[in-house]
Amino acid sequence: MVPVRTSERATTTLWRPTGPKELDLVRELDWRAWPPRLPEQPIFYPVLNEDYAVRIARDWNVKHDGAGYVTRFEVDSGFLSRYPVQQAGGETILELWVPAEELDEFNAHIVGEIELVHEFH
C-alpha cells in the first residue's frame, strides 16, 4: 500500500470491482460508503491495484452480472494498518479482508467520494 499525503492525513488508494446491484447501493449512499454485506458475504475485500480490479470486473462480474465496474477510493492509511495485505494469488493479486461487522467503521474512514473509473458490459 502506498500512502498518499492529503492536506490533513495520509490516505491509501483502493479499488473495488463490483456488479450493478452493489454499484446502485453505493450510488444510493451518495458515493460515500459501501453497503452492508449480505449474510453469505462475511468479508468486504477492496483490492490494492487497478489492474487486478479491472480483471475481476471484466472477467467475473460481466460473466455473472452482465456488467462489471471498477471503483477507486481513498481510506485513511493509519486505519488501514489494522488489515494485513492478503496475497490471493500471484504477486499483484493483493486484497484487504475487512470483516463484515467492521464495514461501518471502515466506511467512516473513507476520505472523499467513491469514484467510478471503469465500466464493462
Image (cartoon, rainbow, N blue to C red):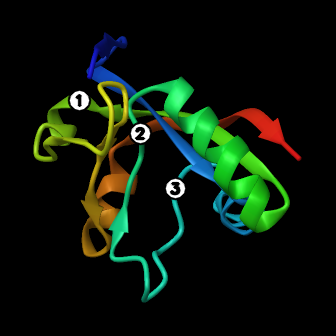
Determine the residue positioned at 55% across, 37% down: 53
Q: Residues within 10 Å of mark 2 (few under 14, many from 20)?
A: many
Q: Nearer the viewer, mark 1 or mark 2?
A: 2
Q: Quadrant of residue 64?
A: bottom right
- Image spot of residue 35 (x, y percent): 53, 68
- Residue type (three-letter) at the residue carrying disc 3: Ala
What residue does disc 1 label? 77
SS for dot 2: loop
Please say if 29 is above or below 114.
below
In this rendering, is residue 108 above or below 41? Answer: above
Residue 84 visible from this viewpoint? yes
- In the rendered image, residue 71, in percent from the top left (x then y), is placed at 62, 39
How packed mark 3 is, by other alpha carbons closer than 10 Å (few <14, some 14-19, many 20 or more), is many
In this picture, residue 16 sits left or right of residue 41: right
Inter-mark Cα distance, 1 to 2: 14 Å
List the residue tagged with mark 2.
47
Task: Decide which of tag 2 and tag 3 comes sooner along the chain.
Answer: 3
Circle number at residue 33: 3
